[in-house]
């Protein structure tokens, strides 16, 4: 048996019908399921961000990755490609293998 979840829906009244009844439109934006490993990598990167006293602009300059993409990576909203994770690891002066190992331990 599954578990029930409370769903919060943004409801917008879109007007009324000629008979006076109102019509309501419910907009549901379903968030994609996040990959646990990618979420763990994002957590490790955020920890490094704080530990290394990095600013977002500095990371963007050091890696050449667009700011919006960096934000999505740090929020765990977008999978990080290995080539870009390698750039981020180099900017933090952290071995890529260490980041991957720490992320793996977080999800075990």
Image (cartoon, rainbow, N blue to C red):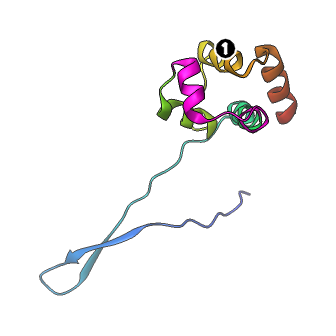
Quadrant (top left, top right, bottom left, bottom right) of the C terminus: top right
Residue 6 location (% of width, % of height): 61, 67
Q: Is residue 31 left or right of residue 99?
A: left
The kind of secondary structure the magenta stretch mainly shows is: helix
What residue is rendered at 57% in x and 18% in y?
63
What residue is rendered at 71% in x and 19% in y?
89
Residue 48 location (% of width, % of height): 76, 32
Residue 2 location (% of width, % of height): 71, 57
Residue 40 location (% of width, % of height): 75, 34
What residue is rendered at 75% in x and 17% in y?
93
Callout 1 crowding tier (Cα within 10 Å): few <14, some 14–19, many ≥20:
some
Q: Is residue 3 left or right of residue 9?
A: right
Name of the residue lying farthest toward the bottom: 20
Question: Which span of residues is magenta-colored?
Answer: 48-64
Is any part of residue 78 visible from this angle?
A: no
What residue is rendered at 79% in x and 14% in y?
95
Q: Is residue 37 magenta?
A: no
Quadrant housing residue 101: top right
Q: Is residue 19 left or right of residue 45?
A: left
Quadrant housing residue 24: bottom left
Quadrant housing residue 1: bottom right
For disc 1, the marked residue is 86
């Amino acid at each position: 048996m599954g578990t029930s979840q409370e769903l919060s829906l943004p409801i917008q009244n879109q007007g009324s019908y000629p008979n006076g009844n109102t019509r309501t439109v419910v907009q549901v934006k379903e968030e994609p399921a996040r990959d646990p490993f990618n979420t763990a990598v994002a957590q490790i990167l955020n920890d490094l961000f704080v530990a290394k006293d990095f600013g977002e602009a500095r990371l963007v300059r050091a890696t050449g990755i667009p700011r919006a993409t960096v934000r999505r990576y740090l929020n765990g909203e977008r999978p990080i490609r290995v080539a870009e994770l390698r750039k981020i690891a180099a900017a933090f002066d952290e071995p890529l293998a260490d980041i991957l190992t720490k992320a793996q331990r977080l999800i075990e």
